Image (cartoon, helix red, strand yellow):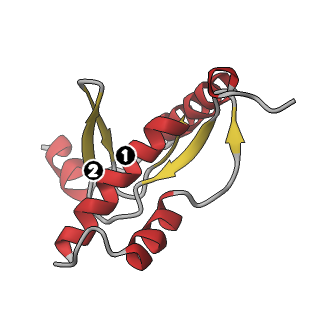
Amino acid sequence: MPLNSAEKIMVAKKFLNFSNEDFSWKFDGVSYEFKAGQEIFLEDFKAEHFAKHLIDREINKLGKRTDYAPLRAELLAKCFPTDEVVTPLEALNLNEKAKVVKKKKVEPEFEELKESKKK
């Protein structure tokens, strides 16, 4: 038996800020920021919302019309590098694991800082 719209299962999908610039936009009055190249699981409706606005920004930078379907389709594919969908709970867990990995990364000290510490 097919699901009606009220019975649809909520899923999360991977959204990628494919651009070389940070991207920020609001959803329901809340600001979101995506670093350049950042991948994150979002509820599908939020991912679609942010993809639309990221694509608009990138098309505007090219000086093209935002309703140019072939270019929109090409950029939409970049926003969603995989067809993988997960439950919202799995998305939270995956996003948290990604944050932990980033926090564990140790940046090497710069030589200038080493020199100033010696003085």
| Residue neighbourhood size for the residue with mark 2, other residues' Cα within 10 Å, grouped as few (<14), some (14–19), many (≥20) | some
- Which sits in the foreground, 83 or 22? 83
**Could you say where residue 56 lies in the image, as x and y percent from the top left?**
27, 61
Query: Mark 2: which secondary structure?
Result: strand
67 shown above or below 45: below
Residue tagged by mark 1?
Answer: 50
Left or right of 105 on screen, residue 61: left
Label 2 sits on what residue type? Phe
Question: In the picture provided, is 32 more to the left or to the right than 10?
Answer: left
Of 103 and 59, nearer the camera is: 59
Q: Which mark is residue 23?
A: 2
Query: In x, y percent, where is residue 25?
Result: 25, 41
Residue 88 found in image quarter: top right
Quick one: quadrant of the N terminus? top right
Residue at 18 percent of width and 72 percent of height: 61
Q: Secondary structure at mark 1?
A: helix
Q: Is residue 104 visible?
A: no
Specify which label sits upstream in the sequence, 2 or 1.
Answer: 2
Query: What residue is shown at x 30% (from left), y 69% (from top)?
Result: 67
- Pick the quarter of the image with the C terminus: top left
Give the foreground label among 2 and 1. Answer: 1
Distance, label 2 to label 1, CA atoms, is 9 Å
Disc 1 crowd rating (10 Å Cα; few below 14, some 14-19, many 20+) is: many
Q: Which residue is rendered at x = 69% and y = 29% of the image?
A: 87
* Amino acid at circle 1: Phe
Indicate the position of residue 33 as horizontal and vertical percent values.
30, 40
Of 2 and 73, nearer the camera is 2
Q: Position of residue 6 (x, y in %)?
A: 63, 21
Extreme residue toward the right, this view: 1
Q: Is residue 16 above or below residue 66?
A: above
Dot 2 and dot 1 residues touching (CB under 8 Å): yes
Regarding residue 83, the answer to whether it shows in the image is yes
